[in-house]
Image: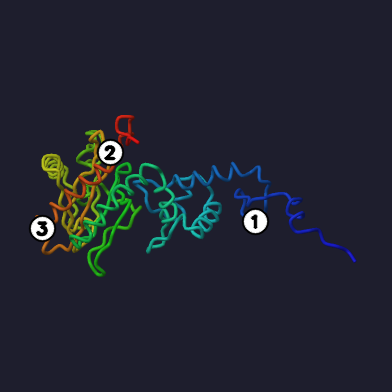
Amino acid sequence: MSLSPDPAIRSRQAPITSLDLNHGGSSVTPITEGPRVLARLLDLLAAFDDRHPELNLSEVSRRSGLPVSTVHRFLVELERGGLVDRSPDGGYVVGQRLWQLGTLAPVHRELREAALPAMQSLLTATGADIALAVRSGVSAVYVERLHCRPGGPIARRPGVPLPLVCGAGGKVLLAYADSALIDRVLVDSQPVTAWTVTDPRRLRLELEAIRRTGLARSAQECVVGAAAVAVPVTNPTRNVVAALVAIIPLAPGPTASLIAGLRSAAAMVSRALSPRPRPTSASLPQH
């Protein structure tokens, strides 16, 4: 009777392999090809950016410099793993799982942890959808969103980029950006809905008003039927790091109590971002 090798031993003896993404077949190559495969994967993911959040197969191939067949195999695996998703019209977009990994970066994790208690309180007190937006290049991205009413206006899902000129949150982030970025954004602003403001002169006036009042308003600029108000969130050095946004039905629109609650919640988040003083010998309890 012949004995088969133990599977664990057999797996140790077999060479480790990976898919060869250079060719059209499904041949295997030694694991030493791993760095090359990873480099191609990074090239593919880099094809997506603020100005190209959705791409079809040929566009990914052209922007990444990889063959269509290679790109297709990558995208199949990335979609299976949730790192890319398919849009309703068949294009590819960055997936929710990849965004979730990005939120583990310390800057976003600390911001979300600092903001969530205030956001929850504001949600309960006002009944509005509450979102926390940050700037990513020339886009605004929600890093957290709390939804209140089924059937009510829904903020864009976290991780989906929106033009900075679109909506109250983006305009807060743009208003406090440097002048070079403002000029760059206003030169090439693109509408999301028929109500998105793209006229550079009008936008500059809005940005000036936001800096003067610390409040941004929008109506149907991101979601038809929805209005929004937003205020800045600052870090300990008084730099604007996020926008706290309340999304409500277009009618009756934001109330004075909602705006007051939004300002109070943003102040709570800003205080939570302040570094806590370390205890000194003078402040330690005496025994």
**Residue placed under numbered mark 2 in the picture:** 274
Q: Looking at the image, which is closer to me, 186 or 219? A: 219
Tell me which amino acid carries mark 1: Ser
Answer left or right for 163 relative to 126.
right
**Element at badge 3?**
loop
Q: Is residue 175 above or below residue 91?
A: above
Instruction: Give the mark, 3 or 1, whose residue is nearer the N terminus.
Output: 1
Instruction: Give the mark, 3 or 2, whose residue is nearer the N terminus.
Output: 3
Q: Quadrant of the C terminus?
A: top left
Tell me which amino acid carries mark 2: Ser
Tell me which amino acid carries mark 3: Thr
Residues under numbered marks 1 and 2 in contact, where contact means CB atoms less than 8 Å apart: no
Percent from the top left, x then y, of residue 25? 64, 56
Image quadrant assignment for residue 205: top left
Percent from the top left, x then y, of residue 249? 17, 63
Distance from the alpha carbon under mark 3 to that under mark 2: 29 Å
Local packing at callout 3 (Cα closer than 10 Å; few below 14, some 14-19, many 20+) is few
Answer left or right for 9 relative to 267.
right
Q: Looking at the image, which is closer to me, 281 or 153? A: 281
Q: Residue furthest right?
A: 1
Answer left or right for 257 relative to 54.
left
Which numbered disc, 3 or 1, marks the residue closer to the eye? 3
Q: Looking at the image, which is closer to me, 248 or 192? A: 248
The residue at 44%/52% (across/down) is 98
**Residue placed under numbered mark 3 in the picture:** 255
Residues under numbered marks 3 and 2 in contact, where contact means CB atoms less than 8 Å apart: no
Percent from the top left, x then y, of residue 178? 24, 34
